[in-house]
Amino acid sequence: MIIENLNKDPLISVILPVYNGAPFLAAAIDSILKQTLNDFELIVINDGSTDDSLSILKHYESVDPRVKIFSRPNRGLANTLNESIELARGAWIARMDQDDIAHPTRFETQLNYLTATGADIAGTWVKRFGAADNRTVRLPQSDAAIKIALLFESAFAHPTVMMKAESIKKLGYEHTWDKAEDYDLWVRAAIYGWKMANVPEVLLDYRVHSSQISTSAAMTQMHLSQGIRKKYWEHLLRSWGCDITCIDDLLKTRTNSKGFNFDQIDAAIGHILKRCEGEARELVIDHARKIYFRIASECPNVITRWRSICKKFNIQSSKKTELTLGLLRTFKITPESKIFIALRATLIYVRR
């Protein structure tokens, strides 16, 4: 039995928001309680669940003093996370979701990595399970690469992050960005100057299931993410003294738009490639490839433009990439088409 010292603050506060999580909740909690590093409290806010979540939570609270349960009407994820952060007593705050499985050494490995790197936040790689897509998601490792990756997408798996409590308590989550609240936080944290890292190891199994996000919620998330991207692109380009007029055309490539200014897209990619190296540079090259694939059906000279970018920034262009660009252009295969979607997993989005 674990005996809690009520006079001592825990090293880690784990925050686990719950809303109708009964089917997978016990497995998620068990994976936390079995951590090799056990100096933590588990703060669970039941956000107005209407299923059996609360009874499951009360059971765990009765058998383990580290588990702290709070229950109230539904207020949404961002509000629930902020309330959890306010309740947290640990020097570090770790996120967890109600349907995922943390590996036993997750906290121990993350804390060692945070100490070694001096980072304010560290996520981990994840292994997807529960659906046909069972891939391992390998996220950028270095601070520089993560901050460049945020121009294109979220660079952390939200349920894996561990953060300095003093840092997250200053920023918090913003309710106005619900459904993209994590991406917004990472961008604000990057602008604020947090040092960022991802442990290059799978420390969490990420469950994929049909009830995670509806089609309408996914559309809302996409719209919000575009606004977050724009904010961050503008911040970085202004900090480098660059013209920001190229941003809108670059962002349009994410929305199946037409009528691009291809020179502006070239300029946006060039601004980034000029200012990054190593892991960050490889990441930008990979995203640039995907952008040119998406505009290929609209761009008459897409292969020439890709070759020009490669020559200017000393990138080795592969025959496979050029053949794919030619195929997409010749047959006018648009990003929203079934053919593009079918090609994406096997031909387009694999590394060159």
Image (cartoon, rainbow, N blue to C red):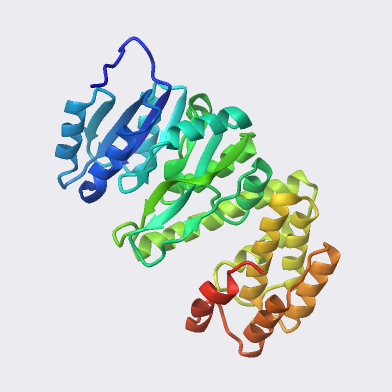
**Residue 19 visible, this orientation:** no
Position of residue 148 measured from the top left corner of the image (x, y, whole percent): 66, 50
Position of residue 226 measured from the top left corner of the image (x, y, whole percent): 55, 58
Q: Residue at x 58, y 84 (%)?
A: 333
Determine whether 119 is above or below 316 in the image.
Answer: above
Name the quarter where the N terminus is drawn.
top left
Q: Residue at x 20, y 32 (%)?
A: 60
Position of residue 105 measured from the top left corner of the image (x, y, whole percent): 42, 36
Determine whether 261 is above or below 60 in the image.
Answer: below
The answer to which of 215 and 118 lies nearer the viewer is: 118
The answer to which of 158 and 222 lies nearer the viewer is: 158
User: Horizontally, is 164 left or right of 262 in the view?
Assistant: left
- Give the quarter of the image for residue 78: top left
**Residue 195 visible, this orientation:** yes
The answer to which of 322 and 340 lies nearer the viewer is: 322
User: Horizontally, is 341 left or right of 268 in the view?
Assistant: left
Name the quarter where the C terminus is drawn.
bottom right
Q: Residue at x 26, y 42 (%)?
A: 74
- Give the quarter of the image for residue 89: top left
Determine whether 258 is above or below 90 in the image.
Answer: below
Position of residue 329 measured from the top left corner of the image (x, y, whole percent): 66, 85
Farthest residue in the top direction? Answer: 7
Q: Residue at x 27, y 38 (%)?
A: 30
The answer to which of 284 and 246 lies nearer the viewer is: 284
| Total residue callouts | 0
Determine whether 62 is above or below 302 in the image.
Answer: above
